[in-house]
Image (cartoon, helix red, strand yellow):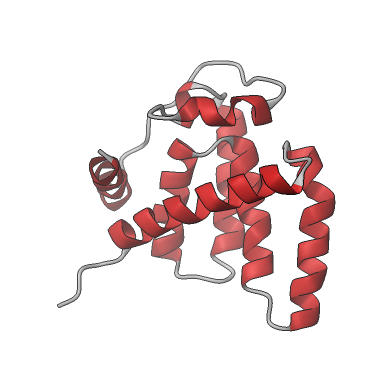
Amino acid sequence: MKNLCCLTIWACVASGAALAAPTLVSPSDTSERASSLSGRDAQSVYSAAEVGVTRRAYRAQCTKHQAADLCECLTAGYAQMLTPNEMRFAAAELRVRFARTDRSRADAQRALDRRAPAMGFPTADLRQVAADRIRALEVDLTATCSPPSP
């Protein structure tokens, strides 16, 4: 099922087709609803505006470090499968992962740790769960988003 979802996302990205736009109002505390997305599209739970803002922020951060095509595909998948708070967390994690020096990595990690409670991840355990979920999805999406080898 995951591969089918990823193929659908890739087909939408490759063809330029728009993903479904939700009309629901976003909940005030997305951290409590993070696990409620299992098998559901985040855009059916959160407002189009909230998903759009986090999607653009993630894409902007991603393209600083990776190819635009890969970032577009990852962003499309994340926008469907992650909560807006998880997308914010994923964007902040990119600063940590792609830091050029140990000092800048440590600074980025401290900044992420300070901002994480406002993103809905007040404890180290909740941050780790979010990070694991993001990494697992990234692995699936990267395999799908990468062009086939000749």
Image spot of residue 15 (x, y percent): 25, 48
Q: Quadrant of residue 64?
A: bottom right
Residue at figure coordinates x 32%, y 59% from the top left? 145
From the top left corner, tell me how far across and down residue 46 is, in percent.
56, 24
**Residue 106 seen from this side:** yes
Residue shown at the point (80%, 54%) measured from the top left: 113
Residue at the left extreme? 150
**Farthest residue toward the bottom?**
101
- Residue 57 visible (yes or no): no
Q: Quadrant of residue 117?
A: top right
Which is nearer the eye, 64 or 85? 85
The answer to whether residue 19 is left or right of residue 85 is left
Q: Position of residue 102 (x, y in %)?
A: 75, 81
Closer to the camera in the image, 93 or 73: 93
Q: Is residue 19 left or right of residue 148?
A: right
Q: Residue at x 59, y 58 (%)?
A: 60
Is residue 97 placed above or below 101 in the rendered structure? above
